[in-house]
Amino acid sequence: MSKTDKNIELNRKTSDLIAGILCSGFSIVGITIMDKSELITWVTIGFFGIGAILLLFRYFNPNSRFLPKQKEYYKKLSDEEFIELYDSNGIFTYDKNGFELQIEQKLTQIEWNEIEKLTAYKVDLFATDEIRLFLKAENGKQFEISESTEGWFQFNEKIKEQFPEINKSWEIDITVPAFERKETEIYNRNKNVG
């Protein structure tokens, strides 16, 4: 477990303990000073009581499958990890004329001058959007990558270098409005797109 993971785990445990104690306190206050003849009193006591039990259970039993930690939601990239991710070529191998990547288990070479069209769009993943990029090249070569593809950042840098007519802020422009596809042709060698 890395130092970052340990810090995240410690912060989660601390917040579980504090929230569990607060819920316990509200339950005790409800039992001692609220009018027990009212339904809202019992709803409040029940809500905070169950919250206290669940949070304290997770605090004392961190490896329980009953209340998973959901580690991925808490994981944050350190600056070094982000720089490493940003600088990675991922699935691409570049040379001065183009790049190579695996398409359907076949190593495929695509030269920059073969690229006919680049189309960007978003996919609604309910809680968030994911930006995707579809590339169409000569001889039926085509593929699609997304923000989660290894090498996404460097590929976008390379296409902006190769095709200066591409709007440098296309990734930002496509994010608004949220949860809409907003399909945008960012490059077409037969049109003046920008």
Image (cartoon, rainbow, N blue to C red):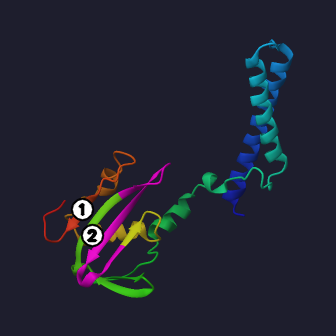
For the residue marked with disc 1, what is the amino acid? Glu
Determine if the magenta segment contains residue 125.
Answer: yes
Question: Horizontal placement of 75 versus 158: left or right?
Answer: right
Main SS, magenta region, reads strand
Task: Residue at 42% x, 88% y: name it.
Answer: 106
Question: Horizontal placement of 5 versus 95: left or right?
Answer: right
For the residue marked with disc 2, what is the amino acid? Glu
Q: Which residues are magenta?
A: 122-143
- Give the image location of residue 20, x and y in percent: 78, 36
Determine if the magenta segment contains residue 97.
Answer: no
Task: Residue at 79% x, 41% y: name it.
Answer: 54
Q: Earlier in the sequence, mark 2 or mark 1?
A: 2
Residue 96 in view (yes/no): no
Question: In the rendering, which numbered label is found on residue 185?
Answer: 1
- Give the image location of residue 81, x and y in percent: 55, 63
**Secondary-structure class at tag 2:** helix
Asked where in the image residue 34 lies, by quadrant, the reply is top right
The answer to whether the residues at label 2 and label 1 have Cβ atoms under 8 Å apart is: no
Residue 12 versus residue 65: which sits nearer the camera? 65
Question: In the rendering, which numbered label is found on residue 161?
Answer: 2
Rounded to the nearest angstrom, the CA distance separating label 2 from label 1 is 17 Å
Question: Horizontal placement of 102 versus 40: left or right?
Answer: left
- Give the image location of residue 129, x and y in percent: 43, 53
- Give the image location of residue 112, x and y in percent: 25, 79
Asked where in the image residue 153 lies, by quadrant, the reply is bottom left
**Secondary-structure class at tag 1:** strand
